Image (cartoon, rainbow, N blue to C red):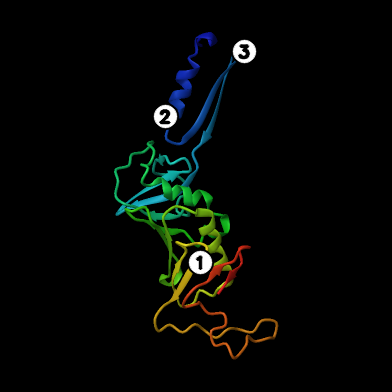
């Protein structure tokens, strides 16, 4: 029943933007009798775990409230203990993790769903069977993600210990001591070269990404 001309559009917009789940909002006056409100919701992208406490963070770096749907499928990152509150932005020390996850292509997300951010800003990821990806500082992110994808696409994971992509132009892979990878299987009726006992196995030294993104050893 208020007069349309007296509606404080800016105040309404600011109250909406103060809601933790609202990323952006617009409020418009439409004559003769309408106030039109549009909102863009924050998009959850990551779970930050500090010990026993888990915070859901949006793509803009905002801490979201508890009780959101479908957050169990989000990646989990163990991060240094910091004080976080719903509705505020995460501190600068945690924002590098958002950069990595924002640039991560969809095929990689399931594989890199468990990670860690250390005090010095270095990141790492846990793979199945206790294997680890040493990502290092948040720099050369696209090249590092390409190196990881090339390795996971082309090299068997059995016996992998650490995949180190801190130098993305020359990633290295080490095998767990005492672990023997299974024998390669036949493809289209043709077995791998019997003279090469490590055919299809993880390299003990390096698996390099070539100039066109292909992985070599």
Q: Do the residues labelled 2 and 1 touch (CB within 8 Å)?
A: no
Residue at mark 2: 18
Q: What element carries label 3?
A: loop
Q: How far apart are the alpha carbons under marks 3 and 2?
A: 27 Å
Q: Residue furthest right?
A: 188
Residue 175 in the image, given as x and y percentages of width and height = 44, 77
Residue at mark 3: 31
Mark 1 and mark 3 lie on one chain; the one further toward the N terminus is 3
Q: Which of marks 1 and 3 is in front?
A: 1
Q: Residue furthest bottom?
A: 195
Residue 95 in the image, given as x and y percentages of width and height = 41, 45
Q: Quadrant of residue 156?
A: bottom right
Compared with residue 187, is residue 9 higher up or lower down, i.e. above or below?
above
Q: How far apart are the alpha carbons under marks 1 and 3?
A: 63 Å
Q: Nearer the viewer, mark 3 or mark 2?
A: 2
Q: In which quarter of the image is the C terminus?
A: bottom right
Mark 1 Cα shell of 10 Å, populated few (<14), some (14-19), many (≥20): some
Compared with residue 89, is residue 128 higher up or lower down, i.e. above or below?
below
Towards the viewer: 205 or 153:
205
Mark 3 and mark 2 lie on one chain; the one further toward the N terminus is 2
Residue 203 in the image, given as x and y percentages of width and height = 50, 77
Residue at mark 1: 170
């Amino acid at each position: 029943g208020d007069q349309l001309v007296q509606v404080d559009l800016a105040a309404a917009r600011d109250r909406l933007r103060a809601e933790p789940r609202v990323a952006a909002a617009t409020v418009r006056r439409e004559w003769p009798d309408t106030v039109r409100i549009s909102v863009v919701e924050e998009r959850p992208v990551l779970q930050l775990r500090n010990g026993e406490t888990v915070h859901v963070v949006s793509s803009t770096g905002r801490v979201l409230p508890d009780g959101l749907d479908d957050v169990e499928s989000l990646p989990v990152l163990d991060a240094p203990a910091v004080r976080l509150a719903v509705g505020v932005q995460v501190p600068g020390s945690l924002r590098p993790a958002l950069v990595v996850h924002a640039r991560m292509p969809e095929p990689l997300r399931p594989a890199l769903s468990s990670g860690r951010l250390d005090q010095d800003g270095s990141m790492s990821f846990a793979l199945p069977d206790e294997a680890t990806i040493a990502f290092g500082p948040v720099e050369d992110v696209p090249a590092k993600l390409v190196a990881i994808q090339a390795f996971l696409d082309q090299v068997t994971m059995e016996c992998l210990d650490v995949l180190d992509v801190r130098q993305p132009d020359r990633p290295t892979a080490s095998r767990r001591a005492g672990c023997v990878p299974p024998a390669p299987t036949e493809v289209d009726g043709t077995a791998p070269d019997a003279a090469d006992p490590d055919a299809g196995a993880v390299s003990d030294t390096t698996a390099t990404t070539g100039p066109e993104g292909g992985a070599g050893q």
